[in-house]
Image (tube, grey):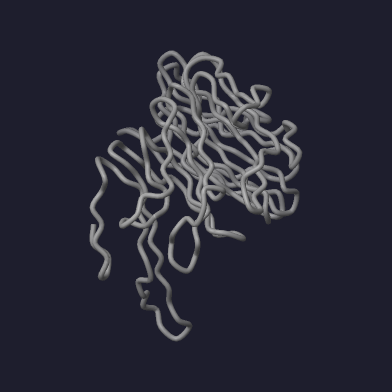
């Protein structure tokens, strides 16, 4: 990969990367600043980034991965416990490097685990993603382990970061099939964490909306977007919570769907020919807007 004067070659298959561009107030042109890559011999992916307070990158890695960001050194290596493991790294903004082992969070079990989304308020880092089997969120403390109910389960976890990552709370959502949280968003007005996830059934996928309070307590909010087909393939893509408490979601659907989890009265039939896109708003009165 070539960006500006930088050339990077992956260590193996896929490697994760992050690049910085900047612009001045009197021009719309962007200038390239730096490029950092992370990975090892297998597939490693960057899935989300957040620049609130500090610059944090999240994703997944397999086998041994180098997380220092400098292609000329290999000083911050991590090894996955099984297949994919989840990672979060705090990146030094001036040069794109990870400065110490305290700036790296990894966890995973023998199956596939990933952090797919991040949102932050001050030092509180909220992560969403999925895990399999048993995941040790705090090394040496089995009381903080998550145990999946079946295959992949979705999770939301909150860590505080000052000089290292410290777990505050974690919750998981799932049943016997694959359940994956695709995106999370924090309402800065309430500090509630809203999430959107795909829930798998025998022959279908459905979109589910949920929320946790700042303390990690489950909030009675939304629920499943109900479909009228046992073979539908509905997938969420993103969620955005506003200070007002309004929440927007996006995704795709291919079957008749009720988009109001609170009161069934907002039924939409997709156009014929495949997946349709949707954007959906929930209001702050616990009913659909």
Q: Is residue 58 left or right of residue 163?
A: left
Place residue 184 in its image quadrant. top right
Which residue is pictured at 62% across the width and 32% down the height?
138
Q: Residue at x 74, y 39 (%)?
A: 213
User: In the image shown, does 40 or 244 lie closer to the viewer?
Assistant: 40
In terms of depth relative to the viewer, which is nearer, 259 or 224?
A: 224
Q: Residue at x 41, y 50 (%)?
A: 75
* Residue 281 visible from this viewpoint: yes
User: Which image quadrant: the C terminus?
Assistant: top right
- Residue at the bottom extreme, as displayed: 26
Residue 210 vs residue 55: left or right? Answer: right
Measured as percent of width and height from the top left, residue 65 is found at 37, 41
Relative to 43, residue 177 above or below: above
Residue 203 location in percent, x, y?
Answer: 40, 16
Query: Viewer-proximal residue, 50 or 279?
Result: 50
Q: In this rendering, is residue 4 above or below 181?
A: below
- Measured as percent of width and height from the top left, residue 27 is found at 41, 83
Q: Position of residue 120 (x, y in %)?
A: 62, 51
Residue placed most toward the observer, 117 or 256: 117
């Amino acid at each position: 990969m070539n960006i500006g004067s930088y050339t990077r070659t992956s260590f193996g298959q896929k490697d994760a990367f992050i690049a910085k561009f900047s612009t001045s107030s009197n021009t719309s042109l962007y200038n390239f600043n730096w490029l950092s890559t992370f990975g090892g011999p297998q597939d490693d992916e960057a899935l989300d980034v957040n620049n609130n307070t500090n610059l944090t990158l999240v994703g997944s890695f397999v086998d041994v991965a180098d997380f220092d960001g400098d292609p000329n050194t290999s000083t911050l290596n991590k090894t996955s416990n099984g297949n994919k493991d989840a990672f979060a790294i705090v990146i030094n903004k001036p040069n794109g490097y990870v400065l110490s082992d305290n700036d790296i969070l990894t966890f995973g079990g023998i199956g596939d685990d990933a952090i797919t989304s991040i949102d932050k308020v001050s030092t509180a880092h909220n992560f969403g993603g999925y895990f399999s089997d048993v995941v040790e969120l705090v090394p040496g403390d089995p009381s903080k382990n998550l145990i999946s109910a079946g295959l992949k389960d979705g999770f939301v976890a909150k860590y505080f970061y000052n000089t290292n990552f410290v777990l505050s709370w974690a919750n998981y959502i799932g049943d016997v099939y694959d359940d994956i949280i695709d995106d999370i968003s924090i309402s800065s007005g309430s500090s509630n964490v809203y999430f959107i996830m795909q829930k798998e059934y025998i022959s279908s996928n459905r979109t589910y909306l949920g929320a946790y309070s700042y303390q990690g307590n489950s909030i009675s909010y939304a629920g499943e977007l109900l479909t009228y087909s046992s073979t539908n393939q509905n997938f969420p893509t993103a969620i955005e919570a506003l200070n007002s408490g309004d929440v927007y979601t996006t995704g795709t659907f291919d079957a008749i769907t009720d988009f109001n989890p609170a009161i069934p009265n907002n039924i939409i039939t997709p156009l014929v020919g495949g997946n349709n896109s949707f954007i959906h708003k929930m209001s702050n009165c616990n009913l659909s807007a």
